Image (tube, grey):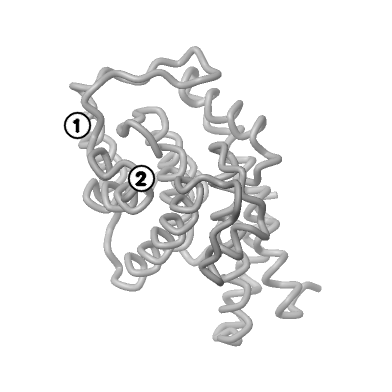
Amino acid sequence: MLEEVKRKKNVLDNNRPLDKRTVKNIREKLYLDLTYNSNAIEGNTLTLNETKAVLKDGITISGKSMREHLEVVNHQEAIKYLEEIIGNNTKISERVIKQIHYLILKTIDTDNAGVYRNRNVTIQGTDYIPPEHYIVPQKMTDFIDWYQEESDELNSIERAAKLHNELVKIHPFIDGNGRTARLLLNLELMSKGYPIVIIEKEDRPEYYDSVEAYSTKGELKEFTELVTKKLNKSLDLYLDILDLNS
């Protein structure tokens, strides 16, 4: 499937510049799907159509919590930040990661938004225990050092997958680690010219299992395969709508 992804990306690249209006419409669809699914994985109960209504029309959905509404609005703002980062060719750094997290959690838990955790945490549904809070800053420094100095030994998809999984493994924040990690995954892919990847709500069991395989055994293969599969789906959307799929 990796070779298929490379082939499809080459088709897109060879047909650039792509129609701007069509690409904008595809991106808007993918951004909506990403926001809905990333929040749904974490327990947000807004449906896809409700998520769209909140974003497009500013509608408040009866029976849904204010936090759920804020999660939607914040996530879209964080996606716009990713576009700014890519447009400015800004490298991934601790500052960038903290800002992504700040946008995810602002007005929900402002005290902890963009701030490394100051207490130990556990992760529901797994036996993995994240590092103690006082070593999180050093773990994050080492993480970024690896990314900036050694990550070129991996291909683009593997690098993005490891970025996601290392952040989840360190679990540097009190809350919002998963959403931040999935945005970091997409930031890396988008910066290399790939479309965004959407881990769907229905993928949750496979997603959690693959993340745990990395956290407990250091195995990246399962998660990389999941990302490749979802990337293939996003590429097909582009190629189908742009009538480039042969």
| Front-lying residue, 164 or 15 | 164
Mark 2 neighbour class, 10 Å CA radius: few under 14, some 14 to 19, many 20 or more: some
Give the residue type that dot 1 points to. Pro
Q: The C terminus lies in which quarter of the figure?
A: bottom right
156 relative to 125, above or below = below
Q: Residue at x 40, y 66 (%)?
A: 80
State the mark number for residue 137. 1
Q: Residue at x 31, y 34 (%)?
A: 173
Side of 40 where 119 appears, left or right = left
Which picture quadrant has residue 110? Answer: top left
Q: Residue at x 46, y 50 (%)?
A: 71
Question: Which residue is labeled 2 in the image?
Answer: 108
57 relative to 75, above or below = below
| Front-lying residue, 139 or 84 | 84
Disc 1 + disc 2, Cβ < 8 Å: no
Which residue sits furthest right?
246
Q: Residue 151: where, in percent of width, then height?
A: 36, 44
91 relative to 41, above or below = below
Side of 113 where 239 appears, left or right = right
Residue 31 in sight from this viewpoint: no
Mark 1 neighbour class, 10 Å CA radius: few under 14, some 14 to 19, many 20 or more: some
Q: Residue 128: where, in percent of width, then height?
A: 45, 16
Q: Residue at x 67, y 66 (%)?
A: 8
* Helix, strand or loop under label 1: helix
Side of 40 where 141 appears, left or right = left
Which picture quadrant has residue 222? Answer: top right
* Helix, strand or loop under label 2: loop
Q: Residue 231: where, in percent of width, then height?
A: 62, 55
Which residue sits furthest front?
62
Q: Residue 205: where, in percent of width, then height?
A: 66, 30
The tally of labels here is 2
| Front-lying residue, 114 or 62 | 62
